[in-house]
Amino acid sequence: MTAKRRGAQLGMLAFAVLIVMGAYAGVGLGINGKVPSGMLGYGLGLGGLMLAAYLVLAKFAPWADPLLLPLVTLVNGIGLVMIYRLEEGGIKDASASNQLMWTALGVVMFSATLIVLRDHRALQRFTYTAGFVGIVLLVLPVLPVVGSEHYGARIWMNLGPFSLQPGEFAKLALVVFFAGYLVAKRDVLALAGRRLLFIDLPRARDLGPVLITWGVSIAVLVAEKDLGTSLLLFGAFIAMLYIATQRTSWVLIGLLLFVGGAVLAGQVFSHVQARFEGWLHASSTAVYDSGTSYQLMQGLFSLGSGGILGTGLGQGYPGLTPFSFSDFIFDAVGEELGLTGLMAILMVYALIVERGLRMSLASRDPFSKLLGGGLSFILAWQVFIIVGGVTRLIPLTGLVTPFMSAGGSALLANWMLIALLVRMSDAARRPPPQAIQDEGMTQVMQR
Amino acid sequence: MSELTLLLIRLAFLAVLWFFVIAAVGVIRTDLFGSRTAPAPPRKPAKQPRPVSKPKKGEPRQLIVTGGPLQGTIINLTETPITIGRANDATLVLSDDYASSRHARLFPQDGQWIVEDLGSTNGTYLERSKVTRPTPVPLGVPIRIGKTVIELRK
């Protein structure tokens, strides 16, 4: 019998909030030598928000996994502290109060998702609607009036005073679509086909959806100059295909297609080429001076000066890296908390993903399994793409570090993702209804 | 704020961060997530067989294993059929390489017990003859299934 483990959840939540408050204090002590006056405000603000999220969770998803919320609270809080620290360090665009507001909106989205969506399996009915919505959200920024281009990527949508990245929400809709689609088609994808050498080849006509998804992700790459989202979407689809069919051939085909597409794009499009150039020859003087790898190398210097134990909160110079509050927040954290701190944060991400995958294993129906696996995978994949990017393992792509980077859309979308995981873990862990009677006995009627 | 204090704060913060991770892992470890083997709520005692209407004279009341590894086993005959074989759900579970998983069946009909072979590989023998179709079993006549011999007794 699974337990609800409310106590553990509340304890871990309080622990996470305390760590974040400690980090605030550390930043103040490191910069000014005194505990910052806003610490109590931020700490109570975050604590209050998370308490609200906890209460909603306890009411509407009482059997949910006890760890998801505290873990997310910790990374979100560390991100807040880091943005606060950069703001204190004089970075204009970093705004901790903005980020706190977006966190609040994220918690509102989290609660709303939990309250409105009582049974995630209802989403299966909207499979194709979700697919359509996802594509529309992806296309929106390309349209002339609503879309706008910043920093070389056309992924923003103007909405009055705000600008949103609809792509962040598109990925949720598309994962729902993939899950629903694959539940219906998994058998045909898994069983039809021939065996060649050691892999099972699918039939040519079953390749259709894979090719379409590939086309869409390449189109995103070309039209929006957004390598990150492109990689994210295609990776998610291939991973879910693999979860659904257990066939390695799909992964191989997917990898070949993507690498082929990326190499081709690198030949044809200058902005992709620049990304490759900045990655492969990051430390060459010519590339660095031309500015192509300036940001990446600053991030690496930042990580290097952090070393194993870090410079200590508030005592490094993470502000030297451009966009250290959004894309490069991982390097900023790495400079001040060191490898030790980064590993702890990566562990927290790994635990979130582990809970998600575990929940998807425990789920009873294939749609939940696929949806849970897909959502957990995109979270992990996102962390991999951005962390791999800023540490120069793979070419740098502009993705956010989930929950940490400054940025409203991503925060909202990721809180919704966690709400979906919480909803599904509630369903997976809820004990099956007890039979009121044993077979053969007279039925007990309850009035 | 001295260097030493800042260093201590830094190390303490990292330690606490890791402690959080370890605590989280601890929650997972003690969390019986996904385990469905926990004790089920106590079941109500299985339905008691209705008391057998008093057996008429000459009707068998017991099945006794007279040969083979289970020698000495006694099964009280009720009105429910008895299945014999290697399957776990058989009434008489044999661990015998010569027996099939669902080997044979004994069932009451009109005051008589009938033995029926359920398509076993090595056959069921009533006395010396192979059972090819449902056959009434007289009292005290050995039924041979693999190495096991059973008899009906009063």
Image (cartoon, coloured by chain):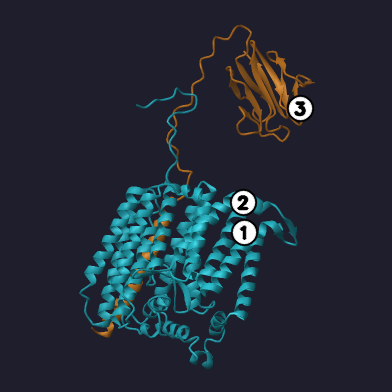
Chain colours: A cyan, B orange
Residue at the extreme right? B129
Same chain shared by disc 1 and disc 2: yes
x, y (%) of residue A188?
66, 51
Q: Earlier in the sequence, mark 1 or mark 2?
A: 2
* Mark 2 surroundings within 10 Å by alpha-carbon count, few (fewer than 14), some (14 through 19), many (20 or more): some
Image coordinates of residue A413 in percent, x first then y, are 41, 62
> Amino acid type of disc 2?
Lys
Q: Amino acid at mark 1?
A: Pro
Which residue is label 1 attached to? A209
Q: Residues within 10 Å of mark 1 (few under 14, many from 20)?
A: few
Q: Is residue B52 left or right of residue A428?
A: right
Tell me the residue that label 2 is attached to: A185
Q: Is residue B20 visible?
A: yes
Percent from the top left, x then y, of residue B39? 45, 40
CA distance separating discs 1 and 2? 10 Å
Q: Are marks 3 and 2 on the same chain?
A: no
In the picture, measured across the screen, residue B106 lies left or right of residue A398, that is right
Going 41% across and 63% down the picture, which residue do you hit? A414
Q: Chain of mark 2?
A: A
Could you tell me how far apart the alpha carbons at marks 3 and 2 are, in whole angstroms? 47 Å
SS at circle 1: helix
